[in-house]
Amino acid sequence: MSAALLARHEWRRLVVQPFAWILAAVVLALMAWQFLIAVQAYLEISPKLGGLKDAPGVTDLVAVPLLRSFAHVLAFVVPLLTMRSIAGERRAATLPLLLASGLGNARLVIGKYFGALGFVIVLIVLVALMPLSLGLGTSLDIGKIAASVFALILYAAALTGIGIACSAWASQPALAAGAAIAMTGLLAVVDAGARMQGIANAGINYLAMPTHLEPFFRGIVASVDVVYFLIVAAVALALAARRLDDLRASADA
């Protein structure tokens, strides 16, 4: 079995699960409701914006806030989607079969990872279509929206890696989800104390996810921010593969 085949299997496993569909429906309904409220608010204040110099447009007042809000939702959605990836296999006693299939630990983790990430990316695309639909009647800053969507994909890549790692180390899916949410929360507020002291450009700030996420929502795509999310995902997947080494050794003992 190859990593691509396992990723396809993981994708199909998510697609046939009622839980995944219910979660996706709730998320899309929530974002659609927020989108409609934002559009209504914009229509109410747009006459006043016409007389202002350099007034913000629909991209800054509707599209970007919606995508930024969706980033907060992903912090809870992704752990729920990844919690069963490996912990669920352990609970169902099917993990030994995967470990004995000849698929290496790295390929197993990567297959699980891309299967889950593919589902999350579909959600991101569906949410992004909401503000993009406004392009039919108004002018959008496509570059800023594209940067924001790119940020969500990178953010989802890091969250999925964390979710897979927590699922590998936890014995139960619920524990995996809780651990992933806690880890994401820690990475979100790790520099809170420093910021309260007025420190905004120190090494501790670099560890925080918002430090690297916010520039994208302003239309700034920097390699340092891209690399940060890729490093988080890579480290998380390495930890997951290391955990599978331990589980394989335990099974062989």
Image (cartoon, grey):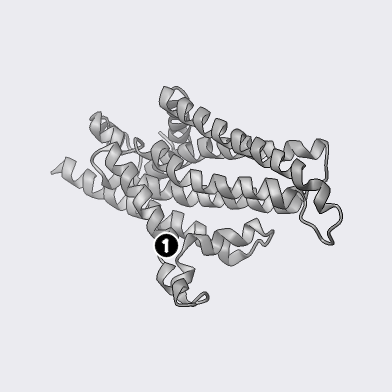
How many numbered markers are drawn? 1
Q: Residues within 10 Å of mark 1 (few under 14, many from 20)?
A: some
Direction left: furthest residue: 253
Foreground of the two, 212 or 167: 212
Instruction: Report the side of 138 relative to 25 (left or right).
Output: right
Against 188, residue 39 (above or below) is: above
Give the percent coordinates (x, y) of residue 221.
65, 61
Q: Is residue 226 left or right of residue 169?
A: right
- Given the image, on which type of amino acid does mark 1 rest? Val
Q: Which residue is mark 1?
A: 189
Q: Is residue 244 visible?
A: no
- Residue at 70% in and 42% down: 41
In the rendering, at what x and y percent does residue 58 appear? 75, 47
Q: Position of residue 119 (x, y in %)?
A: 51, 35
Closer-to-camera residue (125/61): 61
Residue at 38% across, 45% down: 164
